[in-house]
Image (tube, grey):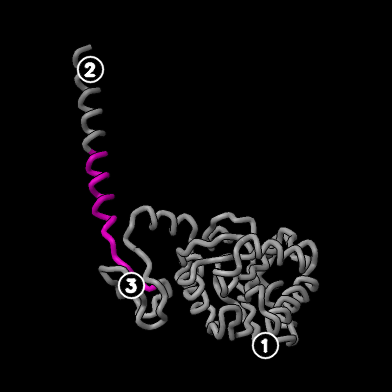
Amino acid sequence: MKLLKYSILLIITFIAFQSCKSEKKEAIVMVTDYQCPMLCEGEKTYDTEGSCPVCKMDLKMINDGSEKVLSQNNEISEASIFNLSSTWHNEEGEALQLRSLKGKTLVMVMIYTSCKAACPRLVADMRNIEAEIPKDKLKNIEFVLISIDPKIDTPQRLKSFAIENEMDDRQWTFLQGTVSGVREFANVLSVKYKEISPIDFSHSNIISVFNAEGELIHQQEGLGVNNKETISSILKVTP
């Protein structure tokens, strides 16, 4: 009996020792480095926070044990927008990250609600695209409108805008971000915008389509253009 107790004690001691070793390994893994999320400079890393000298996006923390596990579990590719770590608020005021949209085809455009020229036409283009999608596929598609004016476009204002434009069904999402988060995302989409007055912006007119993994597959540029290719791209990747 004493021998059995002694053996059990040895086993418990060994497990505890291995656990301590494992914890030490995890601590070693969690050395902080920073890297451009779009890998503009290949595998180059930095040891301090900052922005990419090429695309100006915020550098992303890497070599963090929990982040690696999350990336492996979600199978996010290097080209996915789900690598962006910025936090957004939807029209309901809920905080989220872009990776929460994973699993659906994304049709995205950047607008601002006080726009009286280009944005209403972009909104019309988005609605025209939605109208051409078979109803059975809509559950696997998210139409996302991101504001380039986060100071004015609060979640409450975005909610009102969605209702006024009959875009408050569950396939529509409106996002408000931080100034830096919006700039970072615009760089990814190659969308250019500039504030020309406190309530007015000049901006690119681009609708982008991403697959369920957050990888860009198509862009439609212009206003009131033929959306046949855009719809074809959406249907091609949507089950």
Mark 3 touching mark 2, by CB under 8 A?
no
Would residue 57 be seen by someone viewing this image from the given angle?
yes
Decide whether residue 28 is among the magenta residues: yes
Percent across and percent down for residue 2 are 19, 13
Crowding at mark 3 (Cα within 10 Å: few <14, some 14-19, many 20+) = some
Q: Which quadrant of the figure has residue 36?
A: bottom left
Q: Judging from the image, what secondary structure is the residue with disc 2 in? A: helix
Amino acid type at circle 1 is: Gly
| Closer-to-camera residue (123/18) | 123
Crowding at mark 2 (Cα within 10 Å: few <14, some 14-19, many 20+) = few
Question: Position of 86 compared to 206: left or right?
Answer: left
**Mark 3 = which residue?**
50
Residue range corresponding to the magenta coloring:
18-36
Q: Residue at x 49, y 67 (%)?
A: 178
Mark 1 or mark 2: which comes first in sequence? 2
Q: Give the distance between the C-alpha atoms of the residues marked 3 and 2, in whole angstroms.
A: 56 Å
Amino acid type at circle 3 is: Gly
**Mark 1 = which residue?**
222
Q: Which quadrant of the figure has residue 123?
A: bottom right
